[in-house]
Every structure is written in C-alpha cells, then in structure tokens.
Amino acid sequence: MGSPNNGGGGEEDDKCVPRAAVYKMIKDCTPQIRVSGEAKEFFVQCCNEFIHTLALQANAVCEQQAKKLIHPDHIVTALDNLGFTSYKTNCLNAMETAQEEMAQKRKKLHGKPTSLYSQEELRRQQELLFEQAREELQQLEEDDWAKTQELSKEVLRKKMEATRTDDDNYDD
C-alpha cells in the first residue's frame, strides 16, 4: 500500500534510484552514525526528486540549444541554473571517474578496444592484406630466383673462363 517512493513497489519503482545503492552510500558516508529506516527512505525520495528536477532542467537546456540528446554539458548548465554551481567540480570528477571505470570494464569484457568496422569488413580487409602479402612474397621469390640464376650464370661463366685460361696456359 506504499507509494512508489516509500517502498511500495510497482512500476514506478523502476524509475527510482535503487534503494540498496542509496543505503550503501549512506552507510559509507556515515560509518559512525546509525540512520533510521525513515531517514533512509527520505534520502531515497530526495535522490529521486533531485534527479527528476535535474533531468527536467537538463532537458530544458537541451531544447533551448535545439538539441535532441542530453550531453554532460547540458547537465552542468542545469546544475548552474538550479543553483548547484558549487557541486559542478565534484560532479565533473565523478563523471570522469565513471567514464574511466566504464572504459576499464569494456576493456575487460572485450579484451581489446572495439573496432569501427564490422567483423565482415575486418575479415575482408584481412583477406586483402593476406593476398597482398602473398603477391609480394611471390615477387620476392621470383626476384630471388632471377638473382640466383644470374649469379649461377656468372659463376659458371667465370669457371669456364678459368678453365679456358688454364687450357690456353697448358697448351703453351
């Protein structure tokens, strides 16, 4: 029989800050002080109200700039508009930390940075590179073969000249 913001559950709970996350933050911030259940619920309600108000203001900023996607700078402007300028630095630091954590998670999940190309395109490019490498190798082998043939002819010619010179010296 509770309302969506006081633990009553339901569809509206999906649009609220997770209670467990808020409770953990409260516990982390106040390790020496016990917090009543009523106070914890009030924190949750305040968090939800703050996020709702900030989202509405960021949306207004976004619309004023004729944009269709809210970006972090819209949220920072919304903080200013709502009189929370003193929180900007903390919020920007939190955003940077969150972005770094997400990048680390992505690296762990994927093991490597994601590509701008589809798997199909990457395979096609790889096959082209393999084909180029095969052609270059074949050309190098042909060049090596031609050089070997030239050297063999040169060695053979010198041997024949040496033999002829020895025969000429022998006849004298």
Image: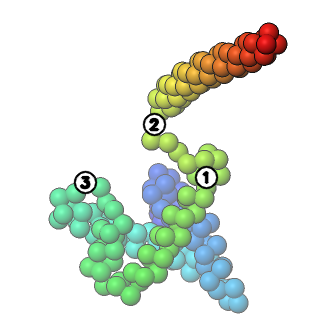
For the residue pair 156 and 93, the one nearer the viewer reads as 156
Location of residue 64 with respect to 14 vertically, above or below: below
Pointer 3 and pointer 1: residues touching (CB < 8 Å)?
A: no
**Amino acid bearing label 2:** Tyr
- The label on residue 107 is 1
Label 1 Cα crowd, 10 Å radius (few <14 / some 14-19 / many 20+): few
Which x, y percent locates residue 169? 78, 16
Considering only order in the chain, which callout, 3 or 2, is on the residue closer to the N terminus? 3
Percent x, y for residue 166? 79, 16
The residue at 70%/90% (across/down) is 32
Residue named by callout 2: 117
Residue 106: x and y in percent read 58, 52
Q: Amino acid at mark 1?
A: Lys
**Circle 3 SS class:** loop
> Does residue 109 appear left or right of residue 162 in this picture?
left
N-terminal-most mark, 3 or 1: 3
Residue 170: numbered disc: none
Secondary element at image label 2: loop
The residue at 17%/65% (across/down) is 64
